[in-house]
Amino acid sequence: MKILVADDSKAMRMIVVRTLRQAGLAGHDILEAENGKAAFDVARAEDVDLVLSDWNMPEMTGIELLTALRSAGSTVPFCFVTSEGSDEMRDLAQQSGAMGLIAKPFTPEAFADALSTVVTA
Amino acid sequence: MSAIDEFEQAREDLEALLIEVLGSVFGEEAAPVWGQELPPGPMVVSRLAIHDEVDDSYTMVEVRTSAVVARVLAGRMLLTADPGPDDLLDALGELGNIAGGNVKSLLRHSCRLSLPTAELSPGPAEVAVDGFTVRSAVLGQVVELTVHSVDTIEGLLWPGTASEEAVETLA
C-alpha cells in the first residue's frame, strides 16, 4: 500500500517512517510531502491508501488537508501525527473524518494501536 | 487568568513535560536540573508562539541547548553522522514544536500555535523578565525550556493558507 507522510520537518518525516517500521508496519511505499498543499496534490495524483499528517504546517494545515480531501470525494484513511493531543483537537479530528490522532512524542506501540486496522506488515 | 499565570501554576507539569519529550526524542533518560545553567558557547534555539484568543496575548515558548546537543539530536533524528546546519535547525525546531504543542495542551482554553522557527545563537539568552524557565539534563548537557509573555512576535509564521503573508508583528 501507499502511505503518504506529511510534515514540514524532514526529521519528523524520517522518524514517522522509522516508527512505522518499529511498529511492525513496514514494507509499504512511502510518499512524503512538506506541507498540506503538496500532500493534497500527492494524495490525488498517487491514489494513496493512508495519510499520516502533521496538524500545523505551512501553506495548508492538516485539518485543511483533510477537509479538502473529503470535499474532493476522497475517503482515504487519515491519521494525524501532531504535537497537540488535547481532547479538543481529538474531537475536531474525529468530527472531520480522521481515523485517529497520534500525539508527539509517540511510541511504536501508539502507531500499532492507531493504525493496525488499516496497515498490515 | 492569563496564559503565563496558568503556566506558573503548571510548573511541575512543565518540568515533567520537558523530561518526557527529551527522553522520547533523544532515546535517553533525562532528569530535571536546578541551579545549573547552559554552558557558554554556541547555542541553538527554537521558538514558537501561543496566541491566547481570549485576551489576545502572546506567549513565547523557547527551547535552547548547546550546538553540541543539537548536533547529537539531529544525527539521531536524521540518521546521519554529520548533520549540517540546516539539519540542526530542523531537529531543534521539531523538538520545540513537540514541546510547544504539549505546553499549549496545558492551557484550559482555546489557543493557536505558530509554526516553529530555529536559529543559531552565540550564547545563552538573558533571563526572561515575565516568565520562567525549567531545565533538564540529557546526555550530561542542559536543555532549557522558557515560557514568557511577549509584546512582539516578529518573524513567526502561522500555519495554514497563505502563511507567508501571515507574518504578524505586534506594535
Image (cartoon, helix red, strand yellow):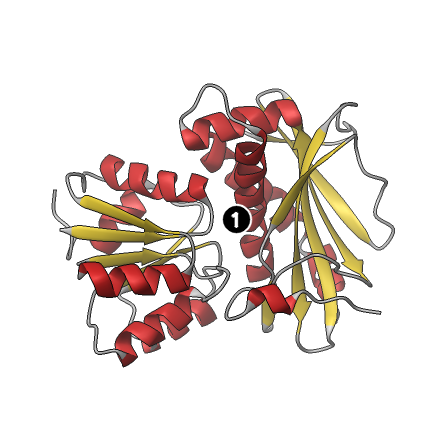
Question: On screen, B106 above or below A17?
Answer: below
In the shown orientation, is residue B7 left or right of residue A14? right
In the shown orientation, is residue B124 left or right of residue B142? right
Picture quarter containing residue B165?
bottom right
Q: For mark 1, name the chain.
A: B
Look at the image and tell me whether residue A30 can be seen.
yes
- Callout 1 amino acid: Ile
Question: On screen, A75 above or below B115?
Answer: below
- Residue B166 position in % (x across, y down): 63, 68
Q: Which of the image's four quarters has the C terminus of chain B?
A: bottom right
- Mark 1, residues whose alpha carbon is within 10 Å: few (<14), some, or many (≥20)? many
Question: On screen, A47 above or below A119?
Answer: below
Given residues B100 and A67, the one toward you in this image is A67
Residue at the spot 22% in from the left edge and 58% down from the top edge: A50
Given residues A23 and B49, the one toward you in this image is B49
Picture quarter containing residue A70?
bottom left
In the shown orientation, is residue B113 left or right of residue A64? right
| Circle 1: element type | helix
Question: On screen, A70 above or below B84?
Answer: below
Total number of numbered discs in the rendering: 1
Residue at the spot 33% in from the left edge and 75% down from the top edge: A68
- Residue B93 position in % (x across, y down): 57, 44
Residue at the spot 59% in from the left edge and 41% down from the top edge: B18
Residue receiving disc 1 = B98
Q: Which of the image's four quarters has the N terminus of chain B?
A: bottom right
- Residue A33 position in % (x across, y down): 36, 53
Given residues B32 and A58, the one toward you in this image is A58
Look at the image and tell me whether residue B143 can be seen.
no
In the shown orientation, is residue B43 left or right of residue B18? right
